[in-house]
Amino acid sequence: MEELYKKIDALLAERGISGAKLSRDLGMSRSFMTELRKGRAKSVTVETARKLADYFGVSVEYLLGGGDEGGGNILTFRSEARELVNGDKELTEYLEELRRRPEQRLLFSVTKHATKAQIEAIVKMVEEMQQGQ
């Protein structure tokens, strides 16, 4: 499990995410990372491994010691290998963004029950913010 902690820690650092944010985003206890770091956690559930892998956009195999990320290449490999969702390249790209970027997930999660008018207002606001950059 020490190897798992090292990989999670490296992924957190690479993405500028704190362990506390990871815990909040995934609904895990903050002590989970401490247990991994100190070597007291001897295993993780399949569900936990899948949540972590999906959060970072890497494979479960990579997290658990198999596979080679190669400086981010696993993300490229997974994207290229993934079949198109309903034959729609654009939809597939959007789903990959949700998988790779927790901030995109946050945006989606707070707007998934929004009305069409609310979403149009949010889109307009984001477009205006991007023009100001």
Image (spheres, helix red, strand yellow):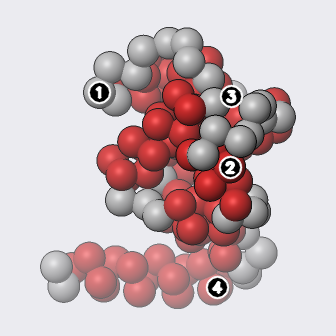
In this rendering, would 68 be left or right of 54? left
Q: CA distance from mark 3 to mark 2?
A: 41 Å
Please report the residue visible at 75 percent of the width from the left and 32 percent of the height from the top: 42
Mark 2 and mark 1 lie on one chain; the one further toward the N terminus is 2
Please report the residue visible at 56 percent of the width from the left and 67 percent of the height from the top: 21
Q: What amino acid is found at the position of numbered circle 4 in the picture?
A: Ala
State whether residue 83 appears in this view. no
Q: CA distance from mark 4 to mark 3?
A: 27 Å
Please report the residue visible at 33 percent of the width from the left and 47 percent of the height from the top: 14
Mark 1 and mark 3 lie on one chain; the one further toward the N terminus is 1
Please report the residue visible at 73 percent of the width from the left and 40 percent of the height from the top: 41
Mark 1 and mark 4 lie on one chain; the one further toward the N terminus is 1
Q: Which residue, given by chain and number where applicable, does mark 4 sit on?
A: 117
Mark 1 burial class by Cα count in 10 Å: few <14, some 14-19, many 20+: few
As drawn, 127 above or below 49: below
User: CB of mark 2 within 8 Å of CB of mark 1?
Assistant: no
State whether residue 16 appears in this view. yes
In this rendering, would 38 be left or right of 127? right
Q: What amino acid is found at the position of numbered circle 3 in the picture?
A: Asn
Mark 4 and mark 3 lie on one chain; the one further toward the N terminus is 3
Q: CA distance from mark 1 to mark 3?
A: 30 Å
Q: What amino acid is found at the position of numbered circle 2 in the picture?
A: Glu
**Residue 86: numbered disc:** 3
> Viewer-nearest of labels 1 and 4?
1
User: CB of mark 1 within 8 Å of CB of mark 3?
Assistant: no
Q: CA distance from mark 1 to mark 4?
A: 41 Å
Q: Which residue, given by chain and number where applicable, does mark 2 sit on?
A: 35
- Looking at the rendered structure, the secondary structure element under dot 4 is helix
